[in-house]
Image (tube, rainbow, N blue to C red):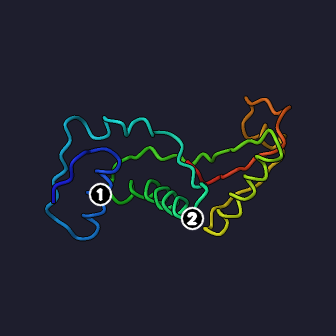
Amino acid sequence: VVVCGGGAIGCSVAYHLAKLGFREITLLEKGRLGCGTTWHSAGLLSQLKGSDVEIGMRKYSRHLYSEIAKETGLDTSWKEVGSLFVASNEGRLTTFKQIQNLGRLHGVDTEMISPDECLRLCPLIRVEDLVGGLWVPSDG
């Protein structure tokens, strides 16, 4: 099997093919692994999104990133730091509550928090205009 592109998707395809038992896999990349547009997506991986499919994929990715170092011996630099979504109006807070309910159906631990709790978690933000937030402690 030949996989073209050594970005996040190409590496993922090669990894999952190997997990399925394929043994002859060649990954082609013109530069270094992850050197193309993949590096633009480096940063926070939040498990919450507006659809079942997206939440399932993000949960799987979170699990994979947190466990792959044990499996391969390679450091992925995964850090479980949590994520904070802040709302400056009731409409946005209602949207966060809906997303929280969807996340709960998928087993994602979340908590609706007050502006003061937002400030405790992120001391550099201004909270005077906030009505609340959604905290996801297992994001990274």
As helix, strand or loop, the secondary structure at mark 2 comes to helix
Label 1: few (<14), some (14–19) or many (≥20) C-alpha neighbours in 10 Å: some
Q: Which residue is mark 2?
A: 52
Q: Tell me: residue 113, above or below residue 37.
A: below
Q: Position of residue 60 (x, y in %)?
A: 47, 61
Residue placed under numbered mark 1 in the picture = 13
For image coordinates 69% across by 44% down, the residue present is: 85
Q: Is residue 92 above or below residue 32?
A: below
**Label 2 crowding class (10 Å Cα cut-off): few <14, some 14-19, many 20+?**
some
Residue 36 image offset from top left, x and y in percent: 31, 35
Q: Position of residue 6 (x, y in %)?
A: 26, 45
Quarter of the image holding residue 72?
A: bottom left
Which amino acid does the dot numbered 2 rest on? Asp
Front residue of 6/74: it is: 6
User: Which is more N-terminal, label 1 or label 2?
Assistant: 1
Q: Residue at x 58, y 60 (%)?
A: 51
| Horizontal and vertical percent position of residue 14 | 26, 57
In the image: residue 111, left or right of residue 57: right
User: Label 1 is placed on what type of residue?
Assistant: Val
